[in-house]
Image (cartoon, rainbow, N blue to C red):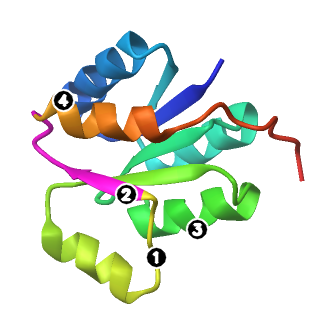
Amino acid sequence: MRTILIVDDDEMTTEFVARIVKRKGFISVTAGSGKSGINFCKEIRPHAVFLDIMLPDIKGGEVYKAIKALDDKIKVFFISASDYELEKLRSQGIHGEGHFSKPVSVVDDIVKILDSLSEPAPHLPN
């Protein structure tokens, strides 16, 4: 079964997104910090990560780089409350597979992302 890791320090956002992920038939795992998100990626090798770009411990861009260093096949979608912060990432050459904005209220945006995720090839440790 496909696993989606949601990395966000806002509990309301993670709960909302996790409910949608589960309704679409995915396994949902949540992490409240960049460090725990990276650790979960090492352990479970999710099919995709929904990553807040403004985490309290490690910036989203650094978490993105760590995830891609572990396995560049993991798809990363950014969660952003700030278009400015998203543009800063892009200017650094960091482009996820997509993004959606906070506050998360448009279910359709998340559903479209989930629908775009096809059955993954098995993730093997590097």
Q: Which residue is mark 1?
A: 94
Name the quadrant containing residue 73. bottom right
Alpha carbons under labels 2 and 3: distance apart? 16 Å
Q: Is residue 32 visible?
A: no
For residue 73, side relative to residue 48 (left or right): right
Q: Which residue is mark 2?
A: 98
- Check if residue 99 falls in the magenta segment: yes
Alpha carbons under labels 3 and 1: distance apart? 8 Å
Which residue is rendered at x = 74% and y = 55% of the image? Answer: 71
Local crowd at mark 4 within 10 Å, few (<14), some, or many (≥20)? Answer: few
Determine whether the residue tagged by mark 4 lies in a helix, strand or loop.
Answer: helix
Alpha carbons under labels 4 and 2: distance apart? 15 Å
Among numbered discs 2 and 3, the one appearing first in the sequence: 3
Determine whether the residue tagged by mark 1 lies in a helix, strand or loop.
Answer: loop
Tell me whether circle 4 and circle 2 mark residues in contact (CB < 8 Å).
no
Residue type, numbered disc 3 = Lys
Q: Which residue is mark 4?
A: 107
Q: Which numbered marker is on residue 65?
A: 3
Q: Position of residue 103 (x, y in %)?
A: 10, 42
